[in-house]
Structures are given as structure tokens and as C-alpha cells.
Amino acid sequence: MRIELSLHEARVIGCLIEKEITSPDQYPLSLNAVTSACNQKSNRHPLLSLDEVDVRGVLDELIKQHLVVERTGFGSRVPKYAHRFCNTDFGDLKFSERELGIVCELLLRGPQTPGELRTRTSRLCAFSDSGEVESVLAGLESREDGPFVIKLAREPGRREPRYAHLFSGEVEVGEEPERPVRRPHRDDDRIARLEEQIDGVRRELEALKEALGVS
């Protein structure tokens, strides 16, 4: 089945994959938790401000596509949601741990360089260097059941090309309009690490709010 997600659908799927890996005790997610994850200020691009009505509409559409399932139980009467996007018994799409980490980050944050992906996937999987990231990206680009990612033209001011996922239709690979020169790559890594720390605090806060029954 060919998957073509809207921006909001990609965000919801990315959030469900992320939380399944990073917060398994809180997964599947309630509607409130999915909404909070979609609207996070860290590790998200673009930033969104969706309400629960918006997110419920997206979830309903993904359920129709058999990419999300609504579940009850799990010690709560509140409906909770799990993805069927990949690595389930309900479809043929399978990813390794590293492939899934990269796909998840691309769904959450859009096109990124191998260096950025190496830092930002640290919560999801482990890479020792950017070369390993590039190797996995090359595999995702050449898989027989794919391709799932595409290499974009290198932007002015960047030392590495960016890669984009192909779950939202065709992507323009030509050179993008010139943008201001970015700061050195090591600053990108430092900022990404700070974002991950902020994300961790947010996850702990969401877990505490859910345990206390605070919306």
C-alpha cells in the first residue's frame, strides 16, 4: 500500500512511534497525550498548535487508513491510540531499530542532515558517527519496497546534504532558495542535545500530569 500522509498525519504517526520507543509505560497514548506530543516545542518542525478536535479528526482519518488503532482498557476507560504504520502484524512495512529512528525523526522534524539525525535519534537508537547514519539512509533510499527517503541538494552554508522522507508524496530535490549561512555544525549538535533534554523534562511532566489526572 502506498502511504501519503498530510503534515498533521505525519506528525501524529511520528509522535506515536516516538512515544512507543521513549515512553513505553505510557503507550498507547490518550487523545490529550497525542495532542501534547504534536504541539511540543522541542524536536518538532514546524511548530504546531492543534487542539484535541483537530487531532481527533486526524486520528479518525488514520484509523480509516488502518495506520492507527483505537484501544480501550490498559487500566483506563479513556480511549488510547497506537500506530499500525510499521513493525506490526497488520502490515508488511518493517524497519530495523536504526531505520525506524531515522524515519521517526524525519516525520517529526522534516529534512535533516546525517549529523543532525545522529544527535536527534539518540533517544531512539544509537549511531557511533554520521557515517553510520549515511549508511542507513542509503539503505532506506535503495530498498526494493521503497524508496523511503531522498537526498536533497546541499543548501548554501551547509556542509552536509539533507534527507527527507517520502511518506508525504514527491519531494523536490533541486537546490532550495539561498538562506543565511548557518552556525557551525557543532553548535547544531549542542542545540539538538539541549532540545533532547527539554523533551525529556516535558515527557516527565506529561507522565506526572497523567498520573495525577490533570489535563
Image (cartoon, rainbow, N blue to C red):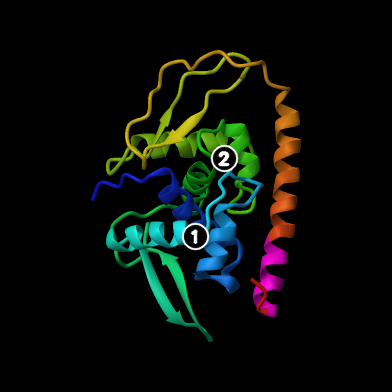
The mark nearer the N terminus, 2 or 1, is: 1
Please indicate, yes or no, whether residue 128 appears anywhere in the rendered image: no
Q: Which amino acid lies under the numbered mark 1 shown in the image of this protein?
A: Leu
Label 1, residues with CA under 10 Å away: few <14, some 14-19, many ≥20: many
Q: Is residue 57 above or below residue 77?
A: above
Q: Name the residue rendered at 64%, 71% in the picture.
A: 215
Report the magenta stretch's main SS. Answer: helix
Picture coordinates of residue 197 (x, y %)?
A: 75, 51
Q: Which mark is residue 113?
A: none
Residue beneath label 2, please? 45
Relative to 45, 149 lies left or right: left
Q: Nearer the viewer, residue 73 or 56?
A: 56
Q: CA distance from mark 2 to mark 1?
A: 16 Å
Secondary element at image label 2: loop
Q: Which mark is residue 16?
A: 1
Q: Nearer the viewer, residue 26 or 151?
A: 26
Q: Name the residue rendered at 60%, 66% in the picture.
A: 23
Picture coordinates of residue 112 (x, y %)?
A: 55, 33
The mark lying in front, picked from 2 and 1, is 2
Q: Is residue 209 above or below residue 15?
A: below
Q: Which amino acid lies under the numbered mark 2 shown in the image of this protein?
A: His
Relative to 67, 113 lies left or right: right
Q: Name the residue rendered at 45%, 56% in the picture.
A: 54
Is-magenta flag for residue 207? yes
Secondary element at image label 1: helix
Is-magenta flag for residue 122? no
Give the residues in magenta: 203-212
Picture coordinates of residue 123 (x, y %)?
A: 63, 53
Label 2, residues with CA under 10 Å away: few <14, some 14-19, many ≥20: some
Residue 127 appears in which quarter of the rendering?
Answer: top right
Please indicate, yes or no, whether residue 78 appears anywhere in the rendered image: yes
